[in-house]
Amino acid sequence: MSDPRHTKLAEILVQYSCKLREGDRVLIEAVDIPHVFTTELVRVAGEAGAQPFVTLKNQAVWRALQLAGSEEQMQLIAEFEAKRMAEMDAYIGVRGTDNVSEWSDIPTDKMGFYESNVWKKVHIDIRVPDTRWVVLRWPSPSMAQLAQMSTEGFEDFYFDVCNIDYERMSRAMQPLKELMDATDKVRLVAPGTDLSFSLKDIPAVCCDGHRNVPDGEVFTAPVRDSINGTIQYNTPTLYQGVTHEDIRFEFKDGKIVGASSNQTEHLEKVLDTDEGSRYVGEFAIGFHPRILRPMKDILFDEKIAGSIHLTPGQAYKEAWNGNSSQIHWDLVLLMDPEAGGGEIWFDDQLIRKDGEFVTPELEGLNPDRLTA
């Protein structure tokens, strides 16, 4: 008998996130997840009249490929995968891992080549703009360890978070989108942070379960050269298998001119990936009512209630500010009282203080209202 939580999640992904229809081709990419859930996704997609295609991957095998593979081989893999992706109407990517640091010892040059010649060509250039897609993590003991929870407790938390009413959340975030669309000047104030930038003429986008699960943010992008000041992130982040804490950036006219963390050498290497990696491609406000603390998994952490994230690297086409890069690194700043508090100002109006929205039209996004 199928776990009813699996069935509900599969139905959200198929019916709500991707809105699969009769005859749609959907690629289900399952990375280190139980076959029982992949099977349930295939079943639910088939019941919707879609044609499911399945790829099974393993992180350890992909590590070995990157270590042993030549550039020519990676380019050929990219061609194969890009051709298949181009034939799809939709994509569901479910990614698990037995070891979140599995790729931590892949040399930077090989990782960079993979990101620019496989990931970018297949996912950034084709999947993101041309398919109805959704991606999510799968609960694993390694994720539970990062979250400092028992395996069973984390699994319960995972399904409680992922199987939320996204249609209700979507309605509640519309006023925030409208306000961000109308905003020019933004100021962020928190311990170690005093940062200003413009959003003028860059659209805001609602993230309500149609792209990521879990979801719960509205994002846009700063005008590329408008950021000035400093930001001190207070959430640990895992990137390329390396854990960073206490990342601090200093901006001048949009560019990161000073950077530090507990892994400053690796941080500088990432920021030197290309010209766009020292500029910001995304600014977002998170408000998922059941995600209340970091767990070093960005698909969860960027949605924490009372958080923002400001992202070095590639901008999304939906909120394009002209910044191109091989990287897109979501870095999270918590603004709730436990994290030291903070304020968000739009055009000199306070809209959120210490993690709580304070204007009447936005109060519906506060956790007590979203879960009432």
Image: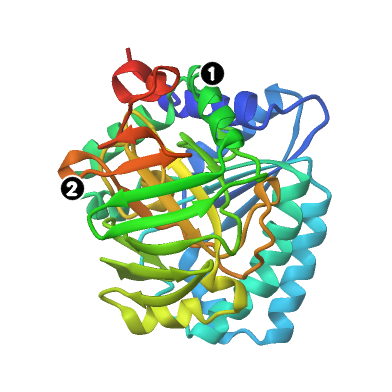
Q: Quadrant of residue 239?
A: bottom left
149 shown above or below 68? above
Distance, label 2 to label 1, CA atoms, is: 30 Å
Say which of 269 and 136 sits in front: 269
Q: Is residue 3 visible?
A: no
Is 21 on the left or on the right of 43, as rendered?
right
Farthest residue, direction top = 372
> Quadrant location of the C terminus?
top left
Which is in the foreground here, disc 2 or disc 1? 2
84 shown above or below 10? below
Residue type at mark 2 is Gly
> Quadrant location of the N terminus?
top left
Q: Is residue 29 visible?
A: yes
For numbered disc 1, what is the local secondary structure? Answer: helix
**Which residue is at a point 52% across and 82% down the rendered structure image?**
272
* Residue 340: mark: 2
Say which of 236 and 172 sits in front: 172
Sequence-first tag of 2 and 1: 1
Q: Badge 1 is on which residue?
A: 171
Is 358 on the left or on the right of 43, as rendered?
left
